[in-house]
C-alpha cells in the first residue's frame, strides 16, 4: 500500500464503516474536502484479486446513486448501447481505460496483474450494472466514462450539508 495520509484513511474508514483494503491513493475529493473515491490495488495483500480500481467511499454519494439505480436508469442506459454506436464506442473506450489503469497499478504495486478477461467495472463494456463504479471512474478520470458522467450530472449536491464524517472523528 502506498503512503496515504492517516487522516484520509480515518475518513475512509468512517465512510465505509470498516477498514479500507488495498488503498493506493485518494483518486478524487468531494467538494467538502474529504475523499470520495479511492484507487485500490488490483490485489489484496494476500494476493486475492480485487478488480475494482476506483471505489466510491462517500456514503451520501453512494445513497444518491442508489436512488438513481432504483429508478431503472441502468436498464435505460444499457438499452441505449444497442441503439447508439457512438455511445457504445465511448463506453468501450472507458472499459479499455479502466483495464489499462488497473494493469499499470498492478505493475506499480509489484503484484501480478489480473488475468486477461477479468471484468473491469460497472458492467463495462456491454451493459450498465453498477452506477457506483461508473461514477467513481468518472470522478477519478473526468471525461472518460460517459455513463458515469450522465449519472453524476443527475446527482444532487451530496456535499451540501457538509462533510459526511465529522472532523472530530478524523483524529
Image: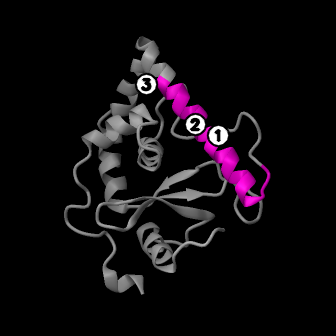
* Label whose residue precedes the other's in the sequence (2 or 3): 3
- 156 is within the stretch colored magenta: no
Q: Which x, y percent locates residue 42?
A: 67, 53
Q: Which x, y percent locates residue 102?
A: 64, 46
The residue at 71%/56% (across/down) is: 108
On residue 97, the disc is: 2
- Count of marks, rendered view: 3
Residue in the foreground of this view, choosing between 108 and 149: 108
Determine if residue 13 is in view: yes
Please state if 139 lies on the left or on the right of 152 as rendered.
Answer: right
Task: Point out the frontmost of discs 2 and 3.
Answer: 2
Residue at which label 3 appears? 78
- Cα separation between marks 1 and 2: 5 Å
- Secondary structure at badge 1 equals helix
Q: Quadrant of residue 101?
A: top right
Please state if 89 lies on the left or on the right of 1 as rendered.
Answer: left
Please state if 157 lies on the left or on the right of 152 as rendered.
Answer: left
The residue at 39%/19% (across/down) is: 80
Q: Quick one: label 3, few (<14), some, or many (20+) residues within 10 Å?
A: some
Residue at which label 1 appears? 100
Task: Point out the frontmost of discs 3 and 1.
Answer: 1
Residue in the foreground of this view, choosing between 11 and 107: 107
Q: Quadrant of residue 74?
A: top left
Give, as a single range, the part of the protein colored magenta: 90-112
Give the vertical position of 72 relative to 9 (above or below): above
Give the vertical position of 31 relative to 154 (above or below): below
Tag 1 near tag 2, CB within 8 Å: yes
Q: Tell me the chief SS of the magenta region.
A: helix
- Cα separation between marks 2 and 3: 19 Å
- 103 is within the stretch colored magenta: yes
Q: Which x, y percent locates residue 157?
A: 22, 53
Amino acid at each position: 500500500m502506498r503512503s496515504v495520509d492517516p487522516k484520509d484513511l480515518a475518513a475512509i474508514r468512517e465512510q465505509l464503516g470498516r477498514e479500507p483494503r488495498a488503498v493506493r491513493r485518494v483518486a478524487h475529493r468531494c467538494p467538502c474536502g474529504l475523499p470520495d473515491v479511492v484507487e485500490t490495488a488490483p490485489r489484496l495483500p494476500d494476493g486475492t484479486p480485487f478488480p475494482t480500481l476506483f471505489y466510491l467511499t462517500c456514503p451520501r454519494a453512494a445513497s444518491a446513486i442508489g436512488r438513481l439505480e432504483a429508478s431503472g436508469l441502468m436498464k435505460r442506459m444499457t438499452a441505449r448501447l444497442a441503439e447508439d454506436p457512438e455511445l457504445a464506442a465511448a463506453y468501450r473506450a472507458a472499459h479499455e481505460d479502466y483495464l489499462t489503469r488497473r494493469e499499470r497499478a498492478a505493475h506499480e504495486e509489484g503484484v501480478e496483474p489480473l488475468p486477461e478477461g477479468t471484468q473491469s467495472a460497472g458492467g463495462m463494456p456491454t451493459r450498465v450494472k453498477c452506477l457506483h463504479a461508473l461514477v467513481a471512474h468518472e470522478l477519478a478520470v473526468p471525461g472518460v466514462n460517459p455513463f458515469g458522467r450522465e449519472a453524476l450530472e443527475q446527482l444532487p449536491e451530496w456535499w451540501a450539508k457538509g462533510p459526511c464524517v465529522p472532523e472530530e472523528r478524523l483524529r
